[in-house]
Amino acid sequence: MPESAWSLHPQLAKDTIDIGDLPLSRVLVIKDANYPWLLLVPRREGAVEIIDLDEVAQAQLMTEITRTSRALKEITKCDKLNVAALGNMVPQLHVHIIARRTSDVAWPRPVWGAAPPVPHDAQEVQQFISAIRRKIWLG
């Protein structure tokens, strides 16, 4: 399906900052300074599950998850990465990549609902976005 038919779900647009596009996925930062938290959203209209992508796109998504995960781990020096495609609240296919620390507010539990979102410091989030963009080859 042509990418022109694709649009970002309104809830994801509200909850994130756009970093840029990899070959398949839009890369976003969740607006919550409690955790370094990225989303990959494949730009494929109607995709809800990973199995909704053809095999080539599935392989590309895995490549992008790997590239983004390595960058996030290197930049944050986190203790653990959480990678998940849940979609219980927002049906559009999206993959969470969250850098976790044993000292974070939710550890060792999942991050969802553990603490209210904390706004990012504007300068810090821009430095983080620049570092991610460099590491995942967005410029």
Image (cartoon, rainbow, N blue to C red):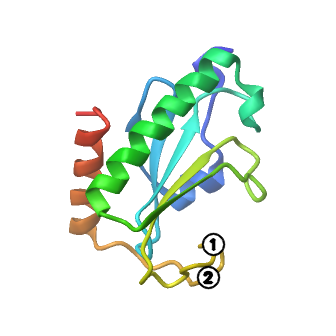
Q: How many marks?
A: 2
Residue highlighted by disc 2: 114
Q: Nearer the viewer, residue 98 or 24?
A: 98
Residue highlighted by disc 1: 110
Spot occupied by residue 47 in the image (x, y as percentages of width and height): 73, 32
Spot occupied by residue 21 in the image (x, y as percentages of width and height): 42, 32
> Where 115 sits versus 138, above or below?
below
Q: Residue at x 41, y 43 (%)?
A: 68
Q: Residue at x 40, y 73 (%)?
A: 33
The answer to the question of whether label 1 and label 2 lie on touching residues, with beta carbons closer than 8 A, is yes
Identity of the amino acid at label 2? Ala
Q: Classify residue 88 by image quadrant.
A: bottom right
Screen quadrant of the N terminus: top right
Spot occupied by residue 120 in the image (x, y as percentages of width and height): 35, 72
Q: Nearer the viewer, residue 105 or 70?
A: 70
Provide the secondary structure element on which disc 1 rests. loop
Screen quadrant of the C terminus: top left
Within 10 Å of disc 2 (Cα), the crowding (few <14, some 14-19, many 20+) is few
Q: Which mark is residue 74?
A: none
> Where 119 sits versus 61, above or below?
below
Q: Residue at x 28, y 32 (%)?
A: 137
* Side of 5 relative to 99 (left or right): right
* Side of 130 relative to 8 (left or right): left
> Where 60 sits versus 87, above or below?
above
Within 10 Å of disc 1 (Cα), the crowding (few <14, some 14-19, many 20+) is few
Identity of the amino acid at label 1? Pro
Marks 1 and 2 sit apart, C-alpha to C-alpha, by 7 Å
Nearer to us: label 1 or label 2: 1
Provide the secondary structure element on which disc 2 rests. loop
Spot occupied by residue 74 in the image (x, y as percentages of width and height): 29, 53
Q: Residue at x 40, y 64 (%)?
A: 36
